[in-house]
Image (cartoon, grey):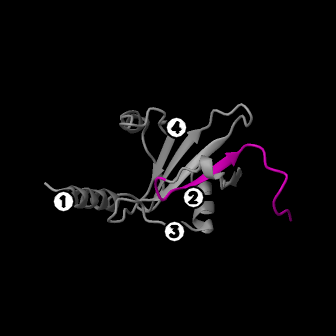
Amino acid sequence: MSKRDIRNEMLRENRAIIGKLSARLTLVPLEELEAIPTPEGFPDWQRPDAVWRSRNYLVQLYVCKNDDYPGLLRLSISRCKVRPDGRFEDGLTWDELYAIKAEVGYGNWYGIEVYPLPEDLQNVQNMRHLWLLPVPLKIGFKS
């Protein structure tokens, strides 16, 4: 079987799985998360602390271990649709990110996106990251 055949089979399987999911984000059972193996070649990989999925989105929650920002969380959000090149479909809007943050229970948390220094850039997939702060920043628009 060629690489193209394998990729096409994976895309067909992904479409079949997504088609069975709800339009609403649903929490993935802990047993399923614990069954995820550490990806080969990624020894520092962190298993998500919670995952939600729907037919449109995959949302992964990480509890950040950061002494400077206790209570910091990260939501990693992507579309479920996979392009033929194996990357997630791109183009998440601000409105979608805001609604997703609320749907998974963090609507009252302050969320920010970070545009890092070039040496800290990690861009391996079409995925957006919202850093959730338990205490709001003293910046932003106030009414």
Of labels 4 and 2, earlier in sequence is 4
Of labels 4 and 3, earlier in sequence is 4
Which disc, if any, is residue 49? 4
Between 121 and 111, the one lying in front of the other is: 121
- Dot 3 amino acid type: Gly
Q: CA distance from mark 4 to mark 2?
A: 17 Å
Q: Position of residue 118 (x, y in %)?
A: 62, 52
What is the secondary structure assignment of the residue under circle 2? Answer: helix
Residue at position x 59%, y 61% in the image: 97
The stretch drawn in magenta includes residue 100: no
Q: CA distance from mark 1 to mark 3?
A: 27 Å
- Dot 2 amino acid type: Ile
Relative to residue 80, is residue 104 depicted above or below?
above
Res. 10 image quadrant: bottom left
- Dot 4 amino acid type: Asp
Query: Is 15 left or right of 89, judged from the image as shown?
Result: left
The magenta span reads 124-143
Of labels 2 and 3, earlier in sequence is 3
